[in-house]
Amino acid sequence: MAKENNQNENYENEIYAASQKELIWMRFKKHKLAMAAGIVLIIMYALAIFAPFFSAQDPHQRRVSYKEAPPHQLHFEDADGNFSLRPMIYPYSKEVDMETFEDIYTEDTSKPTPIKFFVEGFEYEVMGLFETDIHLFGTGDENRPVFIFGADSLGRDLFARIIYGARISLSIGLIGVAVSLFLGILIGGIGGYFGGKIDLFIQRMIELVRSIPQLPLWMGLSAALPSSWSAIQVYLAITIILSLMSWTSLARVVRGRFLSLREEEFVIAARLMGRNPLEIIFIHMLPSFLSHIIASLTLAIPGMILGETALSFLGIGLQAPVISWGVLLQKAQNLYTIANAPWLMLPGLFVIITVLAFNFLGDGIRDAADPYSK
């Protein structure tokens, strides 16, 4: 009993002596679901950043003999029942069903192929610093590839394409949110700081933007992009399109907080000291509710990811040879895929996991940043 009292006293002392950031972190650590979501997102971004290292094969390499090959099963026993801690796969042998003309893949148990780690493969650059050909796993035999997520209709490794696609799908959310953050804070801050006719005009503009259906507008603007643009230009254009539709919610939040803060003593003091409005907005007023903005942005990133996925899925966003989750899901638009190659829908699972992780993380940050939470 005495030990529990001492622990409670120590915890209370830590709370009294903690800064605002430390209090937020202490509350956030109690949110187990948000912590798990943060770990999932760290893994996702690590896979995206170091995609060449984690992929056993070049995502653009086509293997005609492995078109729509199913995922390899990992075995720890060979055909004779001998157990091994090193996982192994059996290479596929392909036959054609003469009635349906479908490819039928069967495992050739006479040729067990062990999975090796830190093997040599295709060359790549690590963050533009140096070149290497070391990969996390593989068979070490170019003629016996491993497809842990199966292959697509052109015989390309789906796992490699998913983690390469994460580079586009995950980064477009961060870049788009950064643009919408600047627009939301600037426009909402100006409206809340000045008030009057300026605020009235900004509110009507926000209502006009929010009244436009998002998906048809995205489709119209994306379809208007010149066909001669490069993949990078289309990527930047899609990011800007998504950002122009997502800043309004943050602008209203900032405007409401600024209306209540502009008469506070520290704002009046800054105004009397001759600070210009932009300095007061970004230096004095914004930090007072920065944690709430971070939570709002975390919850806004999934919308960006879903927007890019939807546009690319419909064929009016990013196009092949660019790799993104939406582009990969274009192959899963028919019943044939669902019936015969369901593994081609795996990019959708990654979209769902990422969106849920961002939502759980945003909920945890919002609860931790709430000064009235216990």
Image (cartoon, grey):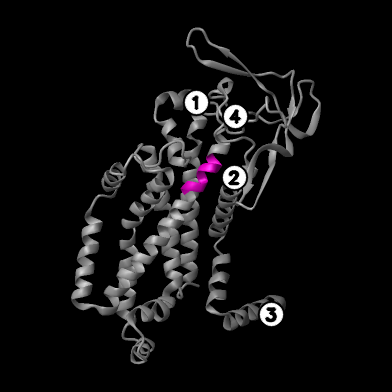
| Residue 153: mark | 1
The answer to whether 292 is drawn above or below residue 215 in the figure is: below
Q: Is residue 91 left or right of residue 211?
A: right
Dot placed on the residue nearer the N-terminal end, 1 or 2? 2
| Category of crowding for the residue at label 1, using alpha-carbon neighbours closer than 10 angstroms: few (below 14), some (14–19), many (at least 20) | some
* x and y, in percent, of residue 308 in the image: 39, 46
Dot placed on the residue nearer the N-terminal end, 2 or 3? 3
Q: Is residue 81 left or right of residue 329?
A: right
Q: Does the magenta stretch include residue 363?
A: no
| Residue 71: mark | 4
| Residue 6: mark | 3
Three-letter amino acid code of the residue under disc 4: Pro
Instruction: State which region is magenta.
Output: 162-169
Dot placed on the residue nearer the N-terminal end, 3 or 4? 3
Mark closer to the observer (3, 4) = 4
Q: Distance between the residues labelled 4 and 1?
A: 13 Å
